[in-house]
Image (cartoon, rainbow, N blue to C red):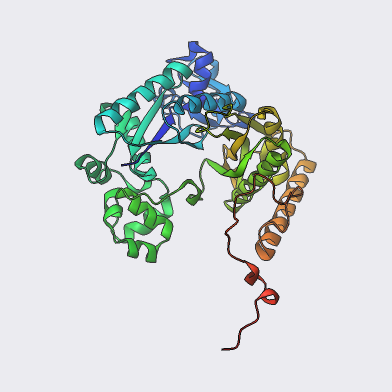
Amino acid sequence: MSMIGLIDCNSFYVSCERVFQPRLCGLPVGVMSNNDGCVISLSDELKALGIKLGAPAFKLQPLVRSGQIHLLSSNYELYGDMSQRVQAVLEEFSPAVEPYSIDEMFVRFDGFAHEALLEHARQLRQKVRQFTGIPVCVGVAPTRTLAKLANRAAKKLPDYQGVCILHAGSAETRHLLQNTALGDVWGVGRRLVERLALMGIKSAWELAQANPKEIRRHFSITLERTAQELRGVPCIEMSDLDEARRHIMTSRSFGKLTDNLDEIREAIRQYGQRSAERLRRQNGLAKAVLVFLKTNPHRQDLLPHSPSLVLELPRPTADSREILHAAGNALERIYRKGHLYQKGGVMLLDLIDADRQQLSLLDTPQSDAERQRSQKLMDVMDDLNRKMGRDTVKLGMPTPGAAWHLRCAHRSDRSTTRWDELPKARAL
């Protein structure tokens, strides 16, 4: 059976800092958001002091001055580089690695017996720590939702020692589902928890045992898929997940291998614009942009190259122009001529709610006016694209037939989208 692993880096931003500052190991350490506003990554030692994620940094300054805790400014380029190093190690263990966020990646494991898979996962965990210095936990299961659950168990329960493997229908999986609250299931938010409670569904196990048709009828096909995945039935792909979360990613395989920078630039521009649209739909702002490229790992005759780079944005934004500018700069820095690339993608990181952004003390009335103009322009673009069709308004000039376009030679005719283009009815 095909198994899916989720590798999650522990306190990733803090762990990256500790790799290059070993003196911080064992100390209470936190990493702050843009403009040193709030704490976005905490070491276990900092959590033990009762400090929570999102704590305002200014309230912690007395502890910093007394030397009781250590707070660092964020360094997204460092974190992006370390994420790429972790991915490079994972690719030695699996031919299929899917980044889910800067600190989480799905990998596929096929053809392993249980004991062999357990040993393989333990070796993977040990090698990532050895070659990158980053501690990780590994959760493996037949579906992504169960893999998320397994990873959570590997991190929270000491008996697993950082590696948990779940099999559909096993007593271990059932016990874990029965003891997992709905709010801890991937993709089940607070509002869904409240609505499901009215139906008497309060645990992951009860959701897994619910009638799928009833779940779809009362909620959505997305929640039905989640319930099926908890049973061990794979039915969620990366592109199916569009809920508000810590990152937004748009990634595609190109129609054919290409080393043409102009074509790749156009692809990255489109991916960045898609991600920005999704960000605005969930009323969010991004603080950083990650761009990555991949060559074909199965082509031994080609030079391998799988670079990525994270660039911090000057301010949290959902403006496609600012996001595409950063994505373009990142692409220029990672592209290497002579490599034939198979895939690329754009990921928006460190997302916040637009209604809760922390404004800078240096903001002026002009800054506020600029933000309002930006929002109005993006609203107009999104509104036109909703009414007139996707890509009616976009940034940049497309190149028809470029290599990065998806292959769709067998797509059926779509002329029925306009009434005046409908084929004439034939007489019966």
Q: Give the residue drawn at x 64%, y 48%.
A: 405
Q: Nearer the viewer, residue 91 or 41?
A: 91
Q: Residue furthest bottom?
A: 428
Q: Is residue 142 left or right of residue 347?
A: left
Q: Is residue 35 left or right of residue 236?
A: right
User: Between 341 and 277, which is closer to the camera in this rendering?
Assistant: 341
Image quadrant where one finds the N terminus:
top left
Q: Give left or right: position of 288 versus 176.
A: right
Residue, far top: 23
Using the image, determine if residue 216 lies above or below residue 406. below
Q: Is residue 314 above or below residue 406?
A: above
Indicate the position of residue 192 as horizontal and vertical percent values.
Answer: 40, 55
User: Residue 81 placed where, x, y %?
Assistant: 57, 24
Front one among 212 and 189 = 212
Circle count: 0
Query: In the figure, is residue 218 to the left or right of 73?
Result: left
From where the camera sits, is residue 162 visible?
no
Name the one closer to the observer, 161 or 293.
293
Split into 4 quadrants, where in the image is the C terminus?
bottom right
Q: Please provide percent x and percent y for residue 196.
A: 35, 57
Q: Position of residue 24 (x, y in %)?
A: 48, 14
| Residue 328, quarter of picture | top right
Q: Is residue 425 above or below residue 13?
A: below
Where residue 34 sits, quadrant-wise, is top right
Query: For the point 38% across and 24% down, which residue is it?
Result: 125
Residue that extends furthest to the right in the rendered view of this protein: 366
Residue at the front extreme, as displayed: 301
Task: Say if residue 105 shows up in the picture.
Answer: yes
